[in-house]
């Protein structure tokens, strides 16, 4: 399990055709940064496409270039690991709108200046459309499996619904087919925190030497709380004090949980672009697969012959099991093959990223045949 | 039920003695703004002290002077209402540290300038100490009942623990005896949102014509989500659009829930002071009644002969029933008389402020004898 994944490619591909978007516009010269692990089989039938979460990236099992930390799913992807790179050709692309090499608001527009807020508002389906264009370019017309957690799972569902000929298996972890009001609300708070920062400058902060780091940090702190369970926060920090024997009667980070949150906020600004955060959370709030398919979620899946595996976590209050259950009901109503499991894990929404052996077994099992 | 409560007093009282604080400092010339309803009985034995929540105030059953809206517990307090002003003399004081007339960071320090961040960090017990000083001044040495919801309930517990001779009945609604890590985390995000706003100016914004309204609004938005249940957000807003037929593919408030949150944030800044928000949330995060009493919560109540009534709401995820249950266990362990009820109400933490007839019955019943 300690063997590193073999990177087959870490590339930025530029699409030759304009990318049409749900908003009606199209984007020229879209670049897609992706990584690939393992070896593509001669029959090109061993591709596992991984789709990343809101602030994730293509560095699934390779060190993050800015933080130096292991890839975000290093524990899941590699030789002999649940997503076994000895068997599968594993692909992951940075989503459209992000800031890790794929085209986003920080990229240069055709006029040579950063898009900033001129970047079109994109959707989850647009992100997937870009990935499908990547697959086309790579000559891949069949996915052994597509797998995503959180916003990744929404992309997996969008792929299943809109490109039903592509995936043979679809694994959706801690996600939803329709963004509920509470999550829209949290996403809005994050965006308000960013746009309230004067350094945001209506989004035109690139090259000014100032960025809305303070606002972005607040957005990240608020979001981060929602990724964890109350129990895990209590277990990890409780009311323990940070490097002090007693409360200071001040506004320093007296509590470990305060210090931890501040660190999460500050370090996030070193690796993520504030405008990307606006666009990606906007795409999430817009996500409603039922609406895209005439209002009935089951209709989204009628053209799919794929097998679905839906996974939720019992302590995830951001994308609770109830949302997965609704999805599974719709899949069942569509006649799809679907298995569904709620895993018990203490870490809340972030469980899909953390040490949950039962998740490893479900993923390995679903991929085995 | 439509009869208005009779205001007996709406006063600001200045304490003649300095107020000692938990931090070790003392405050001179503390002013306490309070309202009273009903008539004090000759025996002075019909006093109900109401303690307000984080951003509440003394205007329990009178219109808010800034917003013109009815008092925050108008539905509960008045002639013939559950807290019956025909029978009880109802008192509520604006908490120390707040901004509705009681001394807080926006008040003038002895040097004639606003305290701002020179205001000492206060605790829940300090807030209660100020109320006890008010009671002393008014010649009240016995409370028929003390009642509080949310941070008000924490004050009620602090009063019960530290001034056990005062209250005969204690009603604690949607509160906790120890602030848990997740709530500390949310409180920290709110403070970070405020202090990230350049208009905060290290707290010295009074008289500058600029205030950290943007940061305060973000803090309020984040907090407001935690006051509501996911189900109530879905019921009230769902994914409904705000005055438009379709999504705009922009960053306006397309969704009703976004528009609602923005309104909540903006209107809050018209009635609340950002520094008060810092100090009051700090007091909440510091609240740990067990720690104050040697680490064993039961010990906090050993000196009390009062009857306790503890109330939680099944959809309250900010102060969930589990926290009330821990409190009730401690009360039972201390040998106190305690009744406990989890009410079913759809509104989340805010249920204590809203139309929950079962709450009316519990309150009226507990006060009846």
Image (spheres, coloured by chain):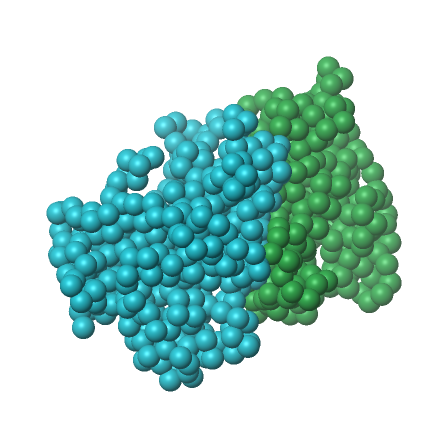
Chain colours: A cyan, B green
Q: Does residue A270 show up?
A: yes
> Does residue B193 show up?
no
- Image height check: is A89 above or below B65? below
Q: Foreground: A153 or B320?
A: A153
Residue B48 location (% of width, % of height): 72, 52
Q: Quadrant of the C terminus of chain B?
A: bottom right
Q: Is residue B52 above or below residue B212?
A: below
The extreme top residue here reads B111
**Which quadrant of the view contains residue B205?**
top right
Is B63 or B131 nearer to us in this picture?
Answer: B63
x, y (%) of residue A1?
13, 51
Name the residue at the front extreme.
Answer: A16
Closest to the observer, A115 or B209: A115
Q: Is residue B277 above or below residue A54?
A: above
Where does the image place residue A30, in percent across and percent down from the top left? 44, 49
Residue under the point 52% across and 59% down: A21
Q: Quadrant of the N terminus of chain B?
A: bottom right
Q: How many marks?
A: 0
Residue B361 rendering spot, x and y as whole percentages: 67, 69
In which quadrant of the rendered view does residue A38 lie?
bottom left
Q: Residue at x 77, y 57 (%)?
A: B74
B206 relative to A160 in the view: left or right: right
State the image quarter where residue B342 is shown.
bottom right
> Which residue is rendered at x = 48% and y = 76% of the image?
A297
- The residue sitting at 46% across, 79% down in the picture is A298
């Amino acid at each position: 399990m300690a063997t590193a994944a073999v990177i087959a490619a870490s590339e930025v591909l530029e699409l030759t055709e304009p990318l049409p978007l749900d908003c009606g516009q199209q984007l020229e010269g879209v670049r897609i940064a992706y990584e690939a692990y393992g070896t593509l089989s001669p029959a090109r039938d061993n591709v596992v496409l991984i789709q990343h979460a809101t602030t994730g990236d293509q560095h699934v099992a390779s060190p993050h270039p800015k933080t130096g930390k292991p890839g975000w799913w290093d524990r899941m992807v590699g030789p002999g690991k649940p997503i076994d790179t000895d068997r599968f050709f594993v692909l992951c692309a940075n989503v459209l709108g992000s800031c890790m090499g794929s085209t986003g608001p920080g990229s240069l527009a055709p006029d040579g200046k950063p898009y900033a807020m001129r970047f079109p508002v994109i959707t989850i389906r647009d992100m997937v459309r870009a990935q499908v264009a990547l697959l086309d370019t790579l000559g891949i017309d069949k996915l052994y499996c597509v797998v995503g957690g959180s916003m990744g799972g929404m992309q997996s569902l969008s792929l299943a619904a809109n490109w039903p000929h592509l995936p043979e298996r679809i694994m959706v972890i801690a996600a939803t087919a329709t963004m509920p009001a509470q999550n829209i609300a949290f996403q809005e708070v994050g965006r308000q925190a960013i746009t309230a920062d004067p350094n945001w400058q209506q989004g035109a902060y690139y090259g000014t030497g100032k960025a809305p780091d303070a606002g972005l940090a607040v957005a990240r702190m608020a979001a981060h709380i929602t990724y964890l369970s109350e129990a895990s926060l209590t277990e990890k920090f409780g009311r323990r004090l940070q490097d002090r024997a007693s409360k200071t009667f001040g506004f320093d980070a007296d509590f470990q949980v305060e210090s931890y949150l501040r660190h999460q906020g500050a370090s996030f600004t070193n690796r993520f672009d504030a405008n990307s955060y606006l666009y990606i959370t906007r795409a999430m709030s817009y996500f409603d697969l039922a609406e895209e398919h005439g209002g009935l979620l089951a209709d989204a899946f009628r053209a799919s012959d794929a097998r679905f595996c839906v996974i939720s976590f019992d302590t995830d209050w951001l994308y609770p099991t109830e949302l997965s259950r609704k999805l599974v009901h719709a899949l069942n109503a569509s006649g799809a093959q679907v298995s569904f499991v709620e895993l018990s894990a203490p870490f809340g929404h972030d469980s899909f990223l953390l040490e949950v052996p039962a998740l490893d077994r479900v993923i390995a099992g679903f991929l085995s045949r």
